[in-house]
Amino acid sequence: MSATGTTEKVANTILDTLIHAGIKPIIKKVAEAADVQLYDFDLVFLGAPSYSFQPPEPVQKFIKAKMKLHMERGDIKPGCPVLPGKTAVVFCTYSGPHTGIAEATPAGDYMGQFFEHLGFSVAAKWYTVGEFKGHEDLSTQGRLGDIRGRPNVKDLAEIESNVSTLLKSIQSR
């Protein structure tokens, strides 16, 4: 979900970096991913903006439906043992007009817990600042200072670097 395009910019940067690394990723919005079997993949990215400290409702519905499915199938075990070779990354975009990154970390934690319950190793939680569209005061007067125009080239380069570093660490296992 990307109402303002910020989360989509990050997702596209991840996608482009994976393709450049020779990986053939599949990208879907949560509305298109109900039939996706997460265990079919060794590396899964899930991203969302933070709305009022949580992922938006479509992402929460996706997670709840997947949790229900995997609980019914018996995939979720006591202690949530980590499944070898199953890695997840969650990324969250936010503008944090009031308290900064503290407004986003609950959303990232929520998405991360989902994967941990499934037995995926959560390799990273990435947080990317995005302009608060349509409200200049919320993009200039919060704890983060002036965030107009973000994510910018530097922010997206950091995502690219994070993906490249992650891929190297996975390949060295």
Image (spheres, grey):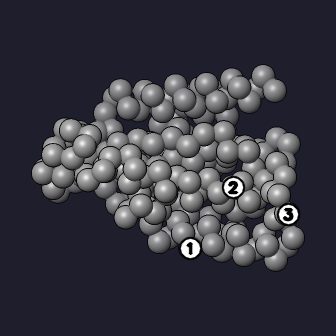
Q: Using the numbered discs, state the Cα–Cα distance from disc 1 to disc 2 in whole angstroms.
A: 15 Å
Q: Which mark is residue 100?
A: none
Q: Which mark is residue 115?
A: 2
User: Horizontal placement of 118 versus 99: left or right?
Assistant: right
Callout 2: 10 Å neighbours few (<14), some, many (20+)?
many
Q: Is residue 55 above or below residue 144?
A: below
Q: Quick one: 146 or 35, which is closer to the camera?
A: 146
Residue 172 in the image, given as x and y percentages of width and height:
78, 22
Q: Is residue 162 visible?
A: yes
Q: Are marks 3 and 2 in contact (CB under 8 Å)?
A: no
User: Horizontal placement of 143 versus 44: left or right?
Assistant: left
Give the foreground label among 3 and 1: 3
Residue at 70% x, 70% y is 67
Quadrant of the image for the N terminus? Answer: bottom left
Residue at 85% x, 63% y is 77
Q: Using the numbered discs, state the Cα–Cα distance from disc 3 to disc 2 in whole angstroms.
A: 13 Å
**Between discs 3 and 2, the one toward the N terminus:** 3
Q: Which mark is residue 77?
A: 3
Residue at 48% x, 33% y is 159
Q: Which mark is residue 61?
A: 1
Residue 160 in the image, given as x and y percentages of width and height:
50, 29
**Element under disc 3:** loop
* Amino acid type, callout 1: Lys
**Element under disc 2:** helix
* Amino acid type, callout 2: Phe
**Element under disc 1:** helix
Q: Using the numbered discs, state the Cα–Cα distance from disc 3 to disc 1 in whole angstroms.
A: 22 Å
